[in-house]
Amino acid sequence: MEYLAYGRTGLEISRLCFGAGHLNNACENYEAGGKLMLKALDEGITFWDTAEGYGSQPHLGEAVRQINREEVVIQTKTGAKDYEGAMVSITRSLQEMQTDYLDVLLLHGISSPKDLVSREGALEAFREAKAAGKIRIIGCSTHIHTGPVMDAVIDHPELDVILTTANKEGRMLEGGPFDRHLEYIQRAYDLGKGISIMKVIVAGDIPETDMPEWIEWGFNLETAHAINLGISDYHHITLDVGLARASARRRLIQSRAA
Ligand SMILES: NC(=O)c1ccc[n+]([C@@H]2O[C@H](COP(=O)([O-])OP(=O)(O)OC[C@H]3O[C@@H](n4cnc5c(N)ncnc54)[C@H](OP(=O)(O)O)[C@@H]3O)[C@@H](O)[C@H]2O)c1
């Protein structure tokens, strides 16, 4: 597994990120979800992505209570727009994940520049929680949106992390062409933002036999610090960790040759 700096956030993450968006449906209870997370950690996946809205935070909490908190980097999200809603959400995330701090908190699914402006109340709560040590890093996810939304979030000085869509054929992306989107990602990367990519396997909408090729494409994207895959069972962990390790070996050889 490759471990690297998450842009200039000061966090160190595993390049393969456990996307826990599908965990709540896939696991029959929190204990089963916690076990899967612990298996992922055993295999070296130290970067975990979730959201209040996924219902999977308690699964992560079940694992967190059995480890040293510092072993993992937890990124979560809130869709709250106003101050009060975001404060409630932060408290809930901390409780559900049995922790006293969040490594990264994202504004969930920014869909337009106007939407970003509408989250100012939530950002105020983020700032306060950061000052109180409850949050380390602030960022946003842009879901499937590109174009003006990327301009807005990249230019925002307080958003140090961006989770966005990228895959081999630019599928699911809305608001602009894929080659331009890759340029946005490059710009954010050059500014030192932490970059995570999702929809790498189009939310599962590609043939099973093609998965390795699409996942490999993600690992080959130099401007992505983290490849977020929606893992929900042990087979996913085996395949994804194998591909992450192969990519780490390739990148090591390339860096030595350079
Ligand atoms: N707006 C946002 O911030 C946002 C939105 C969406 C997702 N996310 C994050 O991104 C993560 C990934 O979600 P995504 O929508 O981008 O999906 P994805 O990773 O492109 O695809 C995940 C789906 O692919 C299938 N799959 C088949 N082989 C797999 C393998 N080896 N490893 C993983 N999945 C495999 C799984 O479905 P089967 O089990 O049916 O095979 C799984 O549900 C989420 O868990 C979440 O953390 C964030």
Image (cartoon, rainbow, N blue to C red):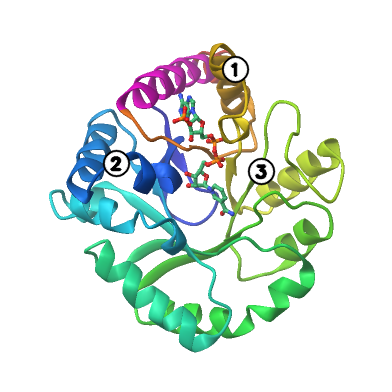
Q: Position of residue 90 (x, y in %)?
A: 39, 74
- Residue 240 belongs to the span the image colors magenta: yes
Magenta stretch secondary structure, dominant: helix
Q: Is residue 162 visible?
A: yes
- Residue 233 belongs to the span the image colors magenta: no
What amino acid is found at the position of numbered circle 1 in the picture?
Answer: Pro
Left or right, 97 with respect to 215, comes to: left
Q: Which residue extends farthest bottom?
A: 84
Quarter holding residue 23: top left
> How far apart are the alpha carbons under marks 1 and 2?
23 Å
SS at circle 3: strand
Q: Nearer the viewer, mark 1 or mark 3?
A: 1
Image: magenta residue range: 234-252
Left or right, 183 with respect to 57, comes to: right
Q: Report the disc number at residue 27.
A: 2
Q: Which of the pair 225/21 is nearer the observer?
A: 21
The residue to which callout 3 is attached is: 165
> How far apart are the alpha carbons under marks 1 and 3?
19 Å
Q: Is residue 74 above or below residue 94?
A: above
The residue to which callout 1 is attached is: 207
Q: Report the disc number at residue 198.
A: none
